[in-house]
Amino acid sequence: MQLKASPQLEMGSLDARPVLGHENKSHLHGNDKSEFIHMSEGGSFPGVSRAGNGKMLSHGICKSIKIVLFSNKLNLLMPFGPLAILVHILTDNQGLVFILSLLGIIPLAERLGYVTEQLACYTGATVGGLLNATFGNATELIISIHALRVGMIRVVQQSLLGSILSNMLLVLGCAFFSGGLVFIKKEQVFNKSTAVVNSGLLLMAVMGLLFPAVLHYTHSEVHFGKSELALSRFSSCIMLIAYGAYLHYQLRTRDHQYMPLNEEGGHGSQNVDDDDDEEPEISKGEAIIWLAVMTAWISFLSEYLVDAIDGASNTWKIPVAFISVILLPIVGNAAEHAGAVMFAMKDKLDISLGVAIGSSTQIAMFGIPFCVVIGWIMGRPMDLNFRLFETAVLFITVLVVAFLLQEGTSNYFKGLMLILCYLIVAASFFVHVDPAKGRKTTTLLESG
């Protein structure tokens, strides 16, 4: 059970309540009342004030820890993070380090999303949307930056690609399937225009990935090995500009687009449950501190996770492509998965769509080009050539999802189709052999 934070009421109750409880309250008016408050804070009762402030601070810290760390059953996985570090120090079992790190990051990713939502309650819709855009996929970006730093460019490309595929097929499919089972006697509806805009952005991302791959495989570059890198960097800058324009469009001119639709197809602001107007459970300062703590801990664990990928692949006889495309995105998408399913079961499919497709759009139009730019700064040859197989999988996935969204309706069968499509994708990467051998060594030599 989560507790509601009410700091203003608590501050008033510590010192003022015993005095206000007397029968004669008539003298507490105007200046007399302000003088009493001043005296209680630091005038005539300094000992009481310090004790009260100390109790308030201690109570606030305990409440914040209880809400963030002990209010979610998924947090039972948090001890796996320190355990992964301990196993790394004591043994050389990279497979065990990988799986423990993976399990340890899952609750951190979910709590990072929760803290971001709490902070967004204080900042308003515009800044809150930017915060969600920045931290919603922070886990994937942190893992990618660590992999990029050690030269594992293929892991970066495949993990970002896997995040898009997971959100579009698995997360959205589970949301459609769960919502369809709960509301089995009717078709759920969502804002079709929003889905069209996101589908267009995803197709633009496919275009950005397709052209460097075609240049590479047709050997039609002006300067072999350099033209596709230059094109990737230019296209990444264009994609970042397009994503910035999309954020402005979404938050400024179309700020009502994720409101649930009523059965007549109009925006039903009166249909939103009272639960949506819940006040934040932690203060703004606590949210910022927790955001920094969660991000730092995820960043620390990500180093162990990335370093153990090759060892886990050799230990389990599983292709690195399968680990990067299928296993790693499950960690980053834990919060999105739970949130999308929950909103779909409440018949708020527009929010589910915003979570699943919106997250895919963030990765495709912001995450991937951002990593290209970061690689450019680091001197790493990170480009948009995701190879022919990966690009083809993304292209087909975007087309399938776009066709299923074009009617603006959902049911459990559409969700089942998306889930089965994801199983086909997972099986494909399980038997796929990445032609790039010696990823780490090759990319470091190329960068030098």
Image: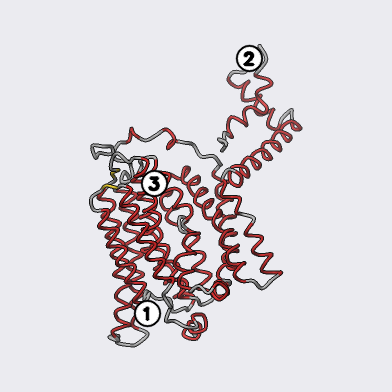
Q: Residue at x 68, y 27 (%)?
A: 15
Q: Give the mark, 1 or 3, whose residue is nearer the N terminus.
A: 3
Q: Which residue is mark 1?
A: 229
In the rendered image, the quadrant that contains the N terminus is top right
- Vertical order, 416 against 437 (above or below): above
Identify the secondary structure beneath mark 3: helix
Q: Nearer the viewer, mark 1 or mark 2?
A: 1
Q: Nearer the viewer, mark 2 or mark 3?
A: 3
Label 2 crowd (10 A; few <14 / some 14-19 / many >=20): few
- Vertical order, 48 against 26 (above or below): below
Q: Quadrant of residue 18?
A: top right
> Quick check: 338 left or right of 299?
left
Q: Residue at x 24, y 53 (%)?
A: 406
Whole-percent x and y of residue 252? 32, 49
Quick one: 237 or 115, which is closer to the camera? 115
Q: Which residue is mark 3?
A: 178
**Amino acid at dot 3:** Ser
Q: Which residue is mark 2?
A: 25
**Amino acid at dot 1:** Leu
Q: What is the CA distance from the residue labelled 1 to the residue labelled 3?
A: 42 Å
Identify the secondary structure beneath mark 2: loop
Q: Give the mark, 1 or 2, whose residue is nearer the N terminus.
A: 2
Q: Residue at x 30, y 62 (%)?
A: 398
Identify the secondary structure beneath mark 1: helix
**Amino acid at dot 2:** Lys
Q: Nearer the viewer, mark 1 or mark 3?
A: 3
Q: What is the CA distance from the residue labelled 2 to the residue labelled 3?
A: 57 Å
Total labels: the figure holds 3
Label 1 crowd (10 A; few <14 / some 14-19 / many >=20): some
- Vertical order, 375 against 278 (above or below): below
Q: Residue at x 48, y 84 (%)?
A: 442
Q: What is the CA distance from the residue labelled 1 to the residue labelled 2?
A: 77 Å
